[in-house]
Amino acid sequence: MFTTDGLVVYPAQGVGRIEGIDRQDIGGVTCEFYVVRIRTNNITLMLPVSNAAHVGLRPLVDRHVAQAVLDSLRTDTERSVHTGQNWNRRFREYSERLKSSDLSVVVEVLRELLLIGRGKELSFGERRLQEQAMNLVTGELAEVLALSEDALREELLTLYAPPPQPEES
């Protein structure tokens, strides 16, 4: 069970703070809800306490996991990505994977999109997914590791930037 003022991660939304636990009568049954305010977009969610784990609400990863994730993003920048499927199919697959409560799944979506974007122009939808994945990953890592989210985003974009094109003479 989570506590008031605790930080949590809600899949596809990111880091949020539990503002309280509310009780409401619904159909004659008293239900408890977590009131969670998502930090990036200031949305307030009400999640049934009894269903929180099922929908993927989870605590932030611990410091060691966050550091390992960041280290892997920093060092594994040269992997090749198979882009055999068309962008539409990739978009649907990545959209589903971004709903995962597992940070490593979201990190892999981000890494793949950054690597694909290194070699070719991403579609509008893929750029949107990349931004969503970047927000989810950097939001949690910055919070856990006490880093600037903007600086972390810039570092990753620089690490995965396309190589400079040789000058034509």
Image: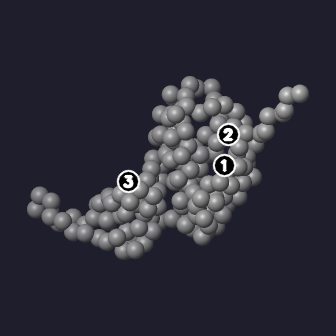
Q: Amino acid at mark 2?
A: Leu
Q: Residue 56, how many percent across, how many down? A: 42, 55
Circles 2 and 3 in contact, beta carbons < 8 Å: no
The answer to which image quadrant residue 150 occupies is bottom right
Q: Secondary structure at mark 3?
A: loop
**Vertical placement of 123 versus 107: above or below?**
above
The amino acid sitting under disc 1 is Leu
x then y, percent, for residue 163 = 77, 39
Indicate the position of residue 112 as horizontal and vertical percent values.
Answer: 63, 40
Residue denoted by label 2? 115
Q: Quadrant of residue 169?
A: top right
Mark whose residue sits in front, 1 or 2 = 1
| Marks 1 and 3, how far apart at CA | 31 Å
Relative to the observer, which residue lies in front, 152 or 23? 152
Q: Which residue is mark 3?
A: 55
Q: Secondary structure at mark 2?
A: helix
Location of mark 1 (residue)? 157
Q: Residue furthest bottom?
A: 4
Task: Indicate whether 33 appears above or below 83.
Answer: below
Q: Residues within 10 Å of mark 3 (few under 14, many from 20)?
A: some
Disc 1 versus disc 2: distance between alpha carbons?
10 Å
Residue kind at label 3, given as amino acid type:
Val
Q: Is residue 48 left or right of residue 71?
A: left
SS at mark 1 in the image: helix
Q: Is residue 43 left or right of residue 97?
A: left
Mark 2 is surrounded, within 10 Å at the Cα level, by few (under 14), some (14 to 19) or many (20 or more) other residues, namely: some
| Farthest-out residue, right | 169
